Image: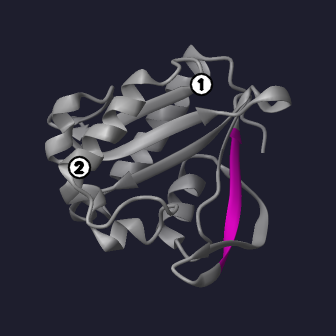
Amino acid sequence: MNHAHLTLRPWRLSDAAVLPGLIGDPAVQRNLRDGLPLPYTEEDARAFLTAMLAADPEAAFPFAIAWEDVAIGSLSLFRQGNIHRCAAELGYYLGRAYWGRGIMTWAVEAACQWAFVHTDLLRIYAAPFARNLPSCRVLEKVGFQLEGTLRQNAVKDGEVLDMKLYARLRDGRP
């Protein structure tokens, strides 16, 4: 797929109009952490965007994944604290209409490149549900290494789930 129309850009309050159609999809929320309302409203989106725009720019790196400047997903890096201050957790989602096109692979690669150039991060990690094979594959395609399985690490919708821990290092070591 030609990704010339894709960008990672800062969130804007005007993105609130499209977020309910992206994150309000139960298929998207199935692979995200709890705490997101369903249905997801424009008011929920405005609250999220306000928080992201007010976040400490040294601790949170939130991006809209945009196609022709319209938000189609989200990608964020959250710096950890204390002795883990040079590590960030990666989280992301993409509207279902955009799945299977290589968009998230492009976005994760672009975000990692940006982070390793513009921050002092040494490590970026992600912990998708083990059942979320497409997300695991995205991470593997862009050089994340599987470090292990976090057994019975989450309860989502009443189901006890394993998670996979992946990481990518600034120096590229496996």
Q: Quadrant of residue 15?
A: top left
- Residue at image x 59%, y 24%? 59
Residue 4 visible in the current orientation: yes
- Residue at image x 80%, y 32%? 84
Q: Dot 1: what SS?
A: loop
Where does the image place residue 149, in percent across and percent down from the top left? 76, 68
Vertical comparison of 53 with 149: above or below: above
Frontmost residue, 153 versus 47: 47
Q: Is residue 26 left or right of residue 36?
A: left
Q: Examine the residues drawn in magenta and state their main secondary structure.
A: strand
What residue is shown with label 1? Answer: 59
Q: Amino acid at mark 2?
A: Leu
Q: Quadrant of residue 50?
A: top left
Q: Which residues are magenta?
A: 161-168
- Residue at image x 19%, y 48%? 42
- Residue 19 is labelled as 2
Q: Amino acid at mark 1?
A: Ala
Where does the image place residue 133, in percent across and percent down from the top left? 53, 72
Q: Quadrant of residue 51?
A: top left
Residue 3 visible in the current orientation: no
Where does the image place residue 136, in percent across and percent down from the top left? 57, 63
Q: Please name the colour scheme applied to the rendered image.
A: one colour
Instruction: Answer few, some or many: residues within 10 Å of disc 2's Cα (few below 14, many 20 plus, some between 14 and 19).
Output: many
Where does the image place residue 164, in percent across and percent down from the top left? 69, 65
Q: Is residue 167 magenta?
A: yes
- Residue at image x 37%, y 44%? 74
Instruction: Answer few, some or many: residues within 10 Å of disc 1's Cα (few below 14, many 20 plus, some between 14 and 19).
Output: some
The first of marks 1 and 2 along the sequence is 2
Q: Is residue 22 left or right of residue 102?
A: left
Frontmost residue, 91 versus 52: 52
Frontmost residue, 97 versus 170: 97
